[in-house]
DNA sequence: TAATTAACAAATGTCGACATTTTAATATTT
DNA sequence: AAATATTAAAATGTCGACATTTGTTAATTA
């Protein structure tokens, strides 16, 4: 059995990262050391080490002697993140189509089924839907077999999730908007399994860019 | 005037990162806290914070209670890094060709000239050549205008530089190999200025992948 | 002699304290 | 009253010390 006890810093890292991505801590908000120490029940060192890692991940910034702050957001950054994410996801899918085997196909079909079934339910839990949605897209690109590209993809997803969270916060009612393009998911799967690289990559780029305009709107009113 | 005094951690970060990328610290090598403190003349906290940032950048790993180590390398990772880097660079060039203006063109021509002139010199300094080479490629993609994509590009370059450093370390004589494909640079510029996306992206991918096989060889003998 | 145990030395991760800087609140001057 | 200067309070970043854990060497046992 492997010794997988993590150090304190990496434990805080996860919680703190989540609290930033989920929008509990808002952009530009000051992160008081004292407050955080109490909130997460930790000492100075591990906390600062976790914050340091979040700096490297662009979720936190620090000015010398002026403390830590949650990274600011902007419409330009929102657009850039989503555009880059679209390009990367398109790359992933193209590679997955090149290299994906039978297991990949099977996993895609399975994930698609789970998403479809749940989307038709009446009173659905947003968390659950988002989880299945994420798993479907992950299954699609899983065949690409490039750890580094995957890592880039993940970090971009984290960043875009923050924008989506902030938007959801202001538009709790419009959750249904998330599921607008449910038919696109089916199309995506079919194109991928048909190994149609061109169409797949084109559709995925559009699919990812869909929510941008909506989020932009509510962001500019802030 | 802006107050741009950095904190101690970010100062160490640069030095330490450089020493890892340049191969002064070898893969898997243990990074003793005590030694590093003396080497960089700093205390525990800022050092550990710098190390934490390098963990997020995948240049350092840490096992709980067992200290910090330079990230390991492998042929698989080498290949993955360079392949991903090639894809990203190709993306950048395509976008640059789409969005690049007259200033972009001018800068590309200028950088190309500087590289060409220096490449013809008899006794050249490797550092200087690498610098001009890097600037040429940067000029080529500068038109892409996506900070996030640029950032991804930079982090991949850092990682690939480490492999190149380790290879150079074992093959000081073969430095000339670096300049093998000098003619490709001219071709690259022409294609970009002709706004030929397809050919540009194809050539840049090949250009980036060129050194992989050479580095692989010397790596597998280690 | 090999293997196991015990004891020691080295190194890590965490905390609390201190000096320095920033921020705020108050007083002073024009 | 507005602007500046002064003082006090809060917060930051750094260090050294301490408890725990790890790794190594020596001793004991089979």
Image (tube, coloured by chain):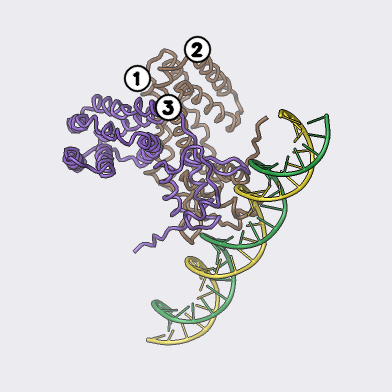
Chain colours: A brown, B purple, C yellow, D green
The residue pinned by badge 1 equals A198
Question: Would you place residue B79 above or below residue B59 in this image?
Answer: above
Question: In terms of depth relative to the viewer, which is nearer, B212 or B32?
Answer: B32
Q: Are marks 3 and 2 on the same chain?
A: no
Q: Give the chain of mark 2.
A: A
Residue B29 visible, this angle: yes
Residue A39 visible, this angle: no
Q: Give the chain of mark 3.
A: B
The residue pinned by badge 3 equals B221
Give how far apart the Cα atoms at labels 3 and 1 are: 40 Å
Q: Quadrant of residue A184?
A: top left
Q: Tell me how many marks there are.
A: 3
Question: Would you place residue A36 above or below residue A213 in this image?
Answer: below
The crowd level at tag 3 (other Cα within 10 Å; few <14, some 14-19, many 20+) is few
What residue is at 47 percent from the left and 55 percent from the top?
Answer: B40
Q: In which quarter of the image is residue A131?
A: top right
Q: In this view, does B143 lie to the left or right of B6?
A: left
The residue pinned by badge 2 equals A102
Looking at the rendered structure, the secondary structure element under dot 3 is loop
Nearest to the eye among marks 3 and 1: give it: 3
Image coords of residue B4 (percent x, y):
39, 60
């Amino acid at each position: 059995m492997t010794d997988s006890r993590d150090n304190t810093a990496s434990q805080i890292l996860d919680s703190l990262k989540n609290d930033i991505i989920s929008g509990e801590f808002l952009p530009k908000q000051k992160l008081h050391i004292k407050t955080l120490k109490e909130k997460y029940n930790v000492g100075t060192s591990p906390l600062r080490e976790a914050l340091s890692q979040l700096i490297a991940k662009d979720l936190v910034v620090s000015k010398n002697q002026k403390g830590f702050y949650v990274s600011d957001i902007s419409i330009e950054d929102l657009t850039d993140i989503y555009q880059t994410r679209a390009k990367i996801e398109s790359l992933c899918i193209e590679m997955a189509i090149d290299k994906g085997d039978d297991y990949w196909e099977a996993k895609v079909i399975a994930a698609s089924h789970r998403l479809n079934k749940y989307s038709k339910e009446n009173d659905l839990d947003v968390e659950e839907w988002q989880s299945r949605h994420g798993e479907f897209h992950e299954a699609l690109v899983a065949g690409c077999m490039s750890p580094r590209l995957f890592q880039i993809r993940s970090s971009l997803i984290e960043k875009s999730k923050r924008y989506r969270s902030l938007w959801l916060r202001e538009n709790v009612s419009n959750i249904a908007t998330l599921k607008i393009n449910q038919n696109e998911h089916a199309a995506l799967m079919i194109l991928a399994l048909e190994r149609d690289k061109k169409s797949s990559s084109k559709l995925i780029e559009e699919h990812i860019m869909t929510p941008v305009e909506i989020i932009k709107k509510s962001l500019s009113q802030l």
